[in-house]
Image: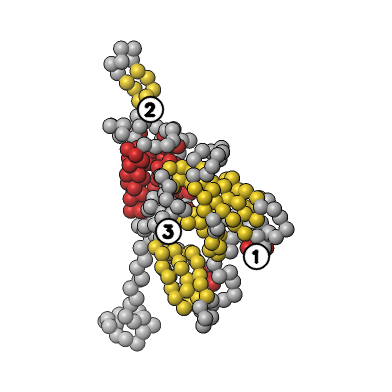
Amino acid sequence: MSVYDHRPLWAGARCDPAPAGGAVSRLDLHASSDRAGEPVASVFPATRLRPGVYRFVLPPVPAGRYWGTVTFTPNSATQPVTDTSIVLDLPIGQGLVASPEAVADALGLPLPLTPAQRAVHETEIRNAQADVAAYLNRSLIPAATTIPGVRPRQAGALDDVGTWALDLDDIAEVDSYRARPDGTYDIDLLVGLHGAREEAIVRYVVAHAAEAIRQRPDQSGGVGRRVSSVSAEGQSVSYESGPVTGQAGALPVLGSLNRLRRLAFQPLRRPSHAPWPYSSSRTGPWI
């Protein structure tokens, strides 16, 4: 089952309708970009996950790209408005930081994908993710963790991880929280790197998955290598060479992800005592 977390946008700014007397009403999914006709599926109402974030639990629908509209009321003084900026490649939450449809866009393939194309795209996405995860020395999928009975250690927004007295050694994000009768909270955390939200990772994975499909000798992805010229008799074929690193259109390199690397930490070994003459211990000959 997939979920979609929506952040309402009104008058060019993020808003939170609930405190102002508004509400997020429904999500409609359409099979075409013009969003005409009856929706393929509708979900209502949304659950307010935290300030400014509303969660829809998506129904089972065939895998593919859908164009969505979210209807919400920004506040008690306005009429319902419709956000038509939502494009979802479903299913979501299957361990992939990019969708097969995004790879198809990079290759110039028409949608919808065939089952064979989807299988090839998913395989190459996972291969590219494995390279990124090995380079960064960390998983690209965060782990969901619940910590019960936590008190805020300082004044601040409860959806800010810095508000809570937590001892974590990795990136963490507050997914949701629930108040308990004793004044403490149960905190649902996402711990670790969320690769699908890192544009640099998504760009790397999509670009390298698309190039791997383009170079497949069986062309099972539905697209072949770039041909620059063919002889008159068809006896020889010349292929285009891709742009080199640093040129426009070149494939992104792993070095572009350096800021996300998780470095191994090892504490320095401390001497058993201060060195002479700052220590009274005599462990060596006098000079």
Q: Residue 124 in the image: state x and y as whole percent.
A: 33, 43
- Tell me the crowding category of disc 1: few under 14, some 14 to 19, or many 20 or more residues within 10 angstroms, Cα based: few
Where is residue 82? Give x, y as percent. 62, 48
Visible residue check, residue 13:
no
Q: Amino acid at mark 1?
A: Pro
The residue that appears at 51% across and 72% down in the rendered structure is 178
**Dot 3: few (<14), some (14–19), or many (≥20) neighbours within 10 Å?**
many
Using a 10 Å C-alpha cutoff, classify the residue at mark 2 as few (fewer than 14 neighbours), some (14 to 19) or many (20 or more): few
Above or below, comparing residue 206 to residue 197 in the picture: above
Foreground: 78 or 148?
A: 78
Q: Amino acid at mark 3?
A: Leu
Q: Report the residue at 54% width, 51% height from top.
A: 27
Give the labeled residue for mark 2.
Answer: 226
Q: Is residue 72 left or right of residue 149?
A: right
Return the residue at label 3.
193
Which is nearer the N-term, disc 2 or disc 3? 3
Q: Find residue 278 and report its horizontal and vertical position in percent.
A: 39, 82
1 and 2 marks in contact (CB < 8 Å):
no
Q: Which residue is mark 1?
A: 19
- In this rendering, would 150 be left or right of 272? right
Quarter of the image with the C terminus in it: bottom left
* Quarter-of-image position of residue 2: bottom left
Of badges 1 and 3, nearer the viewer stands: 1
* Cα–Cα gap, marks 2 and 3: 35 Å
Disc with the residue nearer the chain's start (1 vs 3): 1
Measured in 3D between alpha carbons, the distance from the residue under mark 1 to the one under mark 2, in whole angstroms, is: 55 Å
Of all residues shown, which one is farthest toward the front?
A: 38
What amino acid type should be assigned to the residue bearing mark 2?
Answer: Arg
Q: Residue at x 34, y 12 (%)?
A: 232
Q: Secondary structure at mark 2?
A: loop
